[in-house]
Image: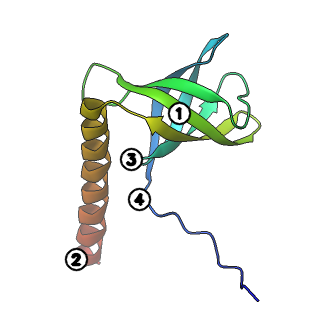
Amino acid sequence: MEQDRPYQRSLYRLSVIYPAMYCMLSAVGEGTMTNLSAMGCTIETDQPLLVDQNVALRLILPDQQESLPIDEAHVRWVHGNLAGIEFTHVERIASLRLHSFVWDGMVQRFLSIQQKRATS
């Protein structure tokens, strides 16, 4: 008999509050990204998305003036106006920027934790 294991994310997620834009076949909308990993994000949208829907995204990150394009993403779950998004197609340059941004955020968080421990 197989035992249930607790759900564990395989990738580090940054807790963020950054603007995002999304595009579906029939509409364009805006939202707020609330967490980000190298493979997906959570977005609070201005209109509900649908599970299994494909969208294109533009993420507004503070590292550059230009938005980060996500050519294709898949809506994995929806809870009201909150949606879990998996990135399914990201151009190479955008992917490198995304991975670097998440890595830098992870390192900053680690250094912050170390500093707090050292001063405690």
Which-is-in-front pick, marks 2 and 3?
A: 3
Q: Three-letter amino acid code at disc 1?
A: Ala
Report the Cα–Cα distance between label 2 and label 1.
Answer: 41 Å
Vertical order, 11 against 15 (above or below): below
Q: What is the spatial separation of the Cα atoms under label 4 and label 1, in whole angstroms? A: 18 Å
Secondary structure at badge 2 equals: helix
Q: Amino acid type of disc 2?
A: Ala
Work out how far the residue at label 4 is from the one at label 2, CA to CA, in angstroms.
Answer: 23 Å
Are the residues flagged by discs 4 and 1 in contact, CB closer than 8 Å? no
The numbered dot on residue 12 is 4
Location of mark 3 (residue): 38
Q: State which quadrant residue 64 falls in.
A: top left
Question: In the orientation shown, which residue stands out farthest toward the front?
Answer: 1
- First reached walking from the N terminus: tag 2 or tag 3: 3
The numbered mark at residue 118 is: 2
Work out which residue is located at the far bottom of the displayed protein and give it.
1
Q: Nearer the viewer, mark 3 or mark 4?
A: 3
* Occupied quadrant, residue 27: top right
Instruction: Please tell me which of labels 2 and 1 falls first in the chain.
Output: 1
Please report the residue visible at 71 percent of the width from the left and 85 percent of the height from the top.
3
Q: Is residue 12 above or below residue 75?
A: below
Question: What distance separates the C-alpha of mark 1 from that of mark 3?
Answer: 12 Å
| Residue type, numbered disc 4 | Tyr
Q: Earlier in the sequence, mark 3 or mark 4?
A: 4
Residue annotated with mark 1: 73
Relative height, residue 34 to residue 57 (above, below)? below
